[in-house]
Amino acid sequence: MTITPAHDAAALTIDLGALVDNWRTLRDRAATAECAAVLKADAYGIGLEPAARALDAAGCRTYFVAHLSEAARLRAVLLDAVIYVLNGLLPGTAPRFPDLGVRPILGSRAELDEWGAFCVLTGQRLPAAIHVDTGMNRLGLSVEEALALVSDPLLARFEPALVMSHLVAAEESNDPVNARQAVDFARVREAYPGVPASLANSSGIFHPGIPGYDLARPGYALYGGNPRPGSANPMRPVLTLEASIVQLREVGAGERVGYNGRWTAPGPRRLATLSLGYADGYLRSASTTDEGLENGLKTGVALVAGRPCPVVGRISMDLTILDVTDVPEVARGDRATLIGGALDVDEVGRRAGTIGYEILTGLGSRYERRYLDARPTALAR
């Protein structure tokens, strides 16, 4: 276990053992499919390098990132891993892929042409994934384009190492788009015999109508997010966010609090100011205002001595105010929990009017980060 003394006013504790356990849960659920790991956005905010080391020690061999810069960081840590770059092939970047030993995910004719030309120029049949759009309308070849590519001489210029698509709404099990995507992708997979296929993301691994194929690629669930909204979360929480109380004060009934005085004390209240704000990724949308209360908005809370205390007033750049009237024993220097315990990342996202993904990936750079090492006994399992 690696924990350093607290010097900063806010701290993230990241449990790498929980991360590894989550990957194992997803691997076991994926059954015969290989289980990869998506480490884009600095491993969803927890730190790419420590996450990669822990997952590699646990047996993960294939990884996905969004950008070449992320691939370079990952390759510096994992020398032998298979690494795919999700966001495609930007013009002129082809030489960087073999230099790093990583693979582009090609999703347009222009990308295919450029990668094929580069392979001819270098005299190498280099690996790449083929991304097929089955409903997202974001990146990827259309199903018909992917089917036509099978008979195109261009396909012989590089090695199709993976054919993949991205699910639109796997977390919504009754959405008919899932069945449509599964049918369309099955057509593509059949047209590429011998090429590994990948469709399931975190929620797709748990969706009974989504085939596992050869490779599952979970992201959010690895970091403790619930892949089955509305059901019990099968994943372990990975991070805890805490901030110190820097000042306590009493306010009377009718006093206004925070920028522009948007929250009014309904009676005598005791307030605690935390050293954390939106510059740290604690979203301003979690603020509590009189108007929001009148409209029944669900806004931010923190746990103080294990008890929920509402955010009051506008969250500012570096500070957040809590109403701690119901926690009389609280003292200056005590810690409040912003993520952790009963406040999982999905609940924090809902209270900020967003999703847990945004909470995780928006975590700021000013936190003291404490890593709990993956347990050796777990790694040997």
Image: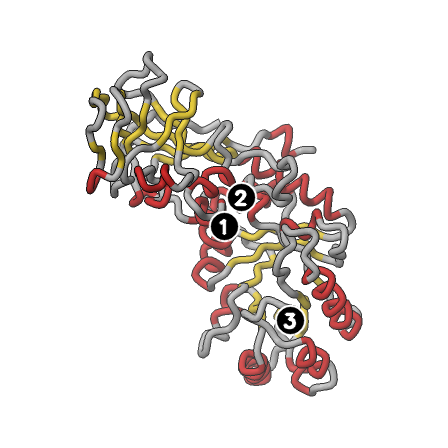
* Label 3 residue SS: loop
Residue 225 x/y as whole percent: 56, 42
Q: Which residue is mark 2?
A: 53
Q: Amino acid at mark 1?
A: Val
User: In the image shown, does 339 or 177 lie closer to the viewer?
Assistant: 177
Classify the position of the C terminus by image quarter.
Answer: top right
Q: Which residue is mark 1?
A: 77
Quarter of image, res 348 = top left
Label 1: how many Cα within 10 Å (few below 14, some 14–19, many 20+): some
In primary-sequence order, the first of circles 2 and 3 is 2
Residue 10 x/y as whole percent: 33, 32
* Label 2 residue SS: helix
The mark lying in front, picked from 1 and 3, is: 3
Q: Which residue is mark 3?
A: 132
* Label 1 residue SS: helix
Q: Residue furthest bottom?
A: 153
Q: Is residue 187 visible?
A: yes
302 vs 255, left or right, is right
User: In the image shown, does 358 or 252 lie closer to the viewer?
Assistant: 252
131 vs 44, left or right, is right
Marks 1 and 3, how far apart at CA: 30 Å
Q: Residue furthest front?
A: 294
Q: Are marks 2 and 1 in contact (CB under 8 Å)?
A: yes
Residue 136 x/y as whole percent: 59, 67
In primary-sequence order, the first of circles 1 and 3 is 1
340 vs 191, left or right, is left
Marks 2 and 1, how far apart at CA: 7 Å
The mark lying in front, picked from 2 and 3, is: 3
The image shows residue 269, relative to residue 135, as above or below, that is above
Q: Amino acid at mark 3?
A: Val
In primary-sequence order, the first of circles 2 and 1 is 2
Marks 2 and 3, how far apart at CA: 31 Å
